[in-house]
Amino acid sequence: MHSLLKRQIRKYLPEDLKAHPEMESFLEAVEKSYENFDDKFSMLHRASAISSDELFEANKSLQKEASQQKSILVSLENAIRSLRENLNDVKDIKIQDEFNTEQLATYISNLASQVSAMSIEKDKLLSSLENQNESLNNYAQMVSHDLKSPIRNINALMSWIMEDEKDKFSDVSKENCSLISENLTKMDKLIGGILKHATMGETEEHKVTFSLEDSLRDIEKTIYVPENIAFEYDNELPEMFFERARLEQLFMNLFTNAITATEHVERGVIKVGYEPDDTYWKFSVSDNGKGIPEKHQKGIFEMFKKLETANNATGIGLAIVKKIAVLYEGDVQLDSEENVGTTFYITLKKNS
């Protein structure tokens, strides 16, 4: 017991008790009771502190768990809403308003069954489509082979007849024979174009590294370019890692299209542009030719669509350009004005 407390107790004791022999024992008993109280109070304080810390941590844990559950419920509700929309299910379910586990499990089970049935149906359709495509490609190749052979034979025979009998033919007959030969050649090109369009993407081609400018100049050498037409290339044409043959097919079709459009111009110019991009190869091919009438622009990339004045065209060249672009997850667009010129914009994904 503190000495000050002892003095205060003795101060208020009667004189006869101050000197009582048992007083010391009484004071010791009081002192021990204080010590027990202090110990109990200290223990209670420690217990309270520990309980508060535990409660704080438990509360934090509960808040975190509640937040996670709320996030899960939101995600689950969004997933069910998406499934419902795709399956055209008009029934609505609000998970967060009334969380009925049995109802939710039944609902999800029904949606899963519908998705499974749709997946099976999709696989059947894909398998059927693959078989049909294979049959169509086989048919296209067979028809191509069976038609090309007699067409070429007829064309060869016409050439021999013209060579052997040219002195006996009138001018009209000679002109008619020339028209026959031209139409046979056109038919041969048409059949080849159909086959190429049908089988585009069926054959594998390995990517190689090459200079685009060198490749384009090689194309110039393999096609007929009138003297009044000049090619101009962007100074920054890239080195490419790509399927070279398909890219050359794309540019060859665009070049021949541009040549047809500019062959009547006093000085025709065909320009190839390039725009650097991390995801796509971006090119443009422009000419200062006759342009494409607006009424023809919408369907210009469809099979057999061509300009009314382009009698020698097959209507397949730009369809092949479009198919190559789509094959590489890209696109082709055009900007054209009559008597001003046309620009084609091509994008091809680099890592497709």
Image: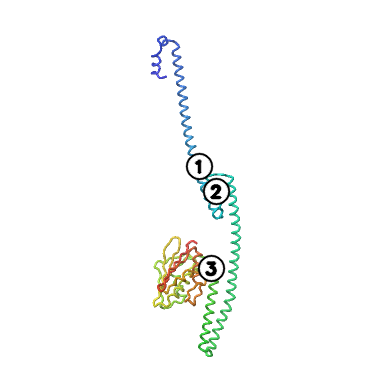
Q: Residue at x 45, y 14 (%)?
A: 26
Return the x and y of residue 338 as percentages of the image width and height: 42, 73
Return the residue at label 1: 66
Q: Which mark is residue 223?
A: none
Secondary structure beneath label 2: loop
**Dot 1 alpha-carbon crowd within 10 angstroms: few under 14, some 14 to 19, many 20 or more:** few
Amino acid on which the number 2 mark rests in the picture: Ile
Placement of the N terminus among the 4 image quadrants: top left
Amino acid on which the number 3 mark rests in the picture: Met
Return the residue at label 2: 93
Secondary structure beneath label 3: loop
Q: Residue at x 48, y 35 (%)?
A: 55
Closer to us: mark 3 or mark 1? 1
Do the residues bearing badges 3 and 1 touch, measured as CB atoms within 8 Å? no
Seen as rendered, the residue at the extreme top is 16
Secondary structure beneath label 1: helix
Do the residues bearing badges 2 and 1 touch, measured as CB atoms within 8 Å? no
Return the residue at label 3: 200
Real-space CA distance between mark 2 and mark 1, rounded to the nearest whole angstrom: 21 Å
3 or 1: tag closer to the N-terminus: 1
Real-space CA distance between mark 2 and mark 3, rounded to the nearest whole angstrom: 47 Å
Closer to us: mark 2 or mark 3? 2
2 or 1: tag closer to the N-terminus: 1
Amino acid on which the number 1 mark rests in the picture: Ala
Seen as rendered, the residue at the extreme bottom is 168
**223 or 322, which lies in front?**
322
**Dot 2 alpha-carbon crowd within 10 angstroms: few under 14, some 14 to 19, many 20 or more:** some
Return the x and y of residue 263 as percentages of the image width and height: 43, 77
Do the residues bearing badges 2 and 3 touch, measured as CB atoms within 8 Å? no
Real-space CA distance between mark 3 and mark 1, rounded to the nearest whole angstrom: 56 Å
Closer to us: mark 2 or mark 1? 2
